Amino acid sequence: MAETYDMIIVGGGAGGLSAAVYAGRAERKAILIEKGSYGGRINETREIRNYPGTIGDTGIGLMEKFKAHALAFPTNELKRTTVTGIKQLDNGNFLVQTKRRGDFETRCVLLDLGTKPRVLGIPGEKEFAGHGVAYCATCDAEMFKGKEIYVLGAGDQAIEEADYLTGFASKVTVIVLHEEGHLDCNEVAAATAFRNPKIDFVWNSTLEEIKGRDEVEGLVIKNVVTGASSEVETDGIFFFVGMIPQTELVRDLVECDDKGYIAVNEKKETSVPGIYAVGDCTQTFLRQVVTAAADGAIAATASERYVKEKKQIDSLLTPDAGKVAFVFYDPYDSEQIEQVSALEEKLRGEWRVERQDITRQSLLYGRLGLTASPATAFYFGGKLMGTEV
């Protein structure tokens, strides 16, 4: 029978690699599966200067260090293939199906699926990605210090990021599809942009082509009213027309919002116990390498506790387990501690009492749908007899 892994990580971005490091440090047997390049979208960033402890590096360089760190632990495996499905088994474990490497059983799954830019298919867009074409102001603004650049988009992100970019570039020109004065962003962002002397606008226009040799050197901009096209010189172009989470694989499995981003809590738990999600594919405030790495650390640690708790529960809920009472309580509430002690005294002799600290052991508590504490769940022979609150 094939071995069951402690954790399978789907996606080798900063979050997934960070989780692998934490899994290796805990000597958990883990597989990280990546279909493309380890590191994800950060590989397109030529200069990293905002990751603590790294004064300067490339995206590729930093991710190579993450990968080497993950591989330093003998319990970790890295595999290159595509995950085609994830199914929950009757025993509570998960089956991760792949395109070329077969199927793997695991006690928990960590999703680091990332995002991809909304591609417009403009000639030169793909060719110059990372060479003058950029999608993240926080990541790449410093590359354009003192240069003249363009921004495509008129929504909140585009206009707010254009203002941010003026802290680095000498001039930022925003290409806007609408008539003069009409932006799609909120009024505060619009007013700020209009007041900024380093921001200019090209109205009634769209981007037709990106030109250059090794780097972006110019743009062809088309006026949608007159139909006339004109070529301008520039050092770069930022696209802010939206990102797409790559979560198609699990949208029928875990809860996602209407844009496809995975809903997680502070432990990076999804709506399915045992499945975690990290990084850009989640509903998160900031999508940066430092936050993705932190997500990976949180999820790996939370999943380790989940596996231990599940093993404990499974061992206590066997057909020959007899009478077991799980008492759920909050250890930071002194009144509840007193109540639990009294309850233990009352049940002792007839029931085996198992205390469950709901701040650390929430699996069975959540499975039972309990929302208040202290509470007690009574089992006989592994079967639920009832609950009391």
Image (cartoon, rainbow, N blue to C red):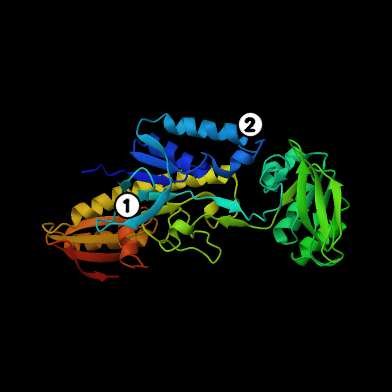
Q: Position of residue 252 (x, y in %)?
A: 42, 64
In the picture, the quarter occupied by the N terminus is top left
Alpha carbon separation for disc pair 2 and 1:
37 Å
Residue 134 in sight in this render: yes
Q: Residue at x 24, y 65 (%)?
A: 377
Q: Residue 95: which disc? A: 1
Crowding at mark 2 (Cα within 10 Å: few <14, some 14-19, many 20+): some
Q: Are marks 2 and 1 in contact (CB under 8 Å)?
A: no
Q: Quadrant of residue 332?
A: bottom left
Is 324 drawn above or below residue 19 in the view shown?
below
Q: Nearer the viewer, residue 135 or 266?
A: 135
Point out the tag, 2 or 1, that comes first from the N-terminus: 2
Residue 261 drawn above or below residue 114: below
78 horizontally vs 312: left or right? right
Picture mark count: 2
Q: Secondary structure at mark 2?
A: loop
Helix, strand or loop at mark 1: strand
Query: Which one is in front, 34 or 269?
Result: 34
Crowd around label 1: few <14 · some 14–19 · many ≥20 (10 Å):
many
Q: Which residue is mark 2?
A: 57
Using the image, tell me which numbered label, if any, was put on residue 166.
none
The C terminus sits in image quarter: bottom left
Q: In the image, what residue type sits under mark 2?
A: Asp
Badge 1 amino acid: Leu
Residue drawn 75% across the image and 66% down it? 184
Q: Nearer the viewer, residue 206 or 245?
A: 206
Q: In the displayed structure, does residue 385 sit left or right of residue 20?
A: left
Estimate the x, y position of residue 129 in percent, counting from the top left.
67, 43
Location of residue 77 in the rendering, given as x and y in whole percent from the top left corner = 38, 36
Q: Is residue 18 above or below residue 239?
A: above
Whether residue 264 is visible here, answered yes or no, is no
Q: Nearer the viewer, residue 85 or 112?
A: 85
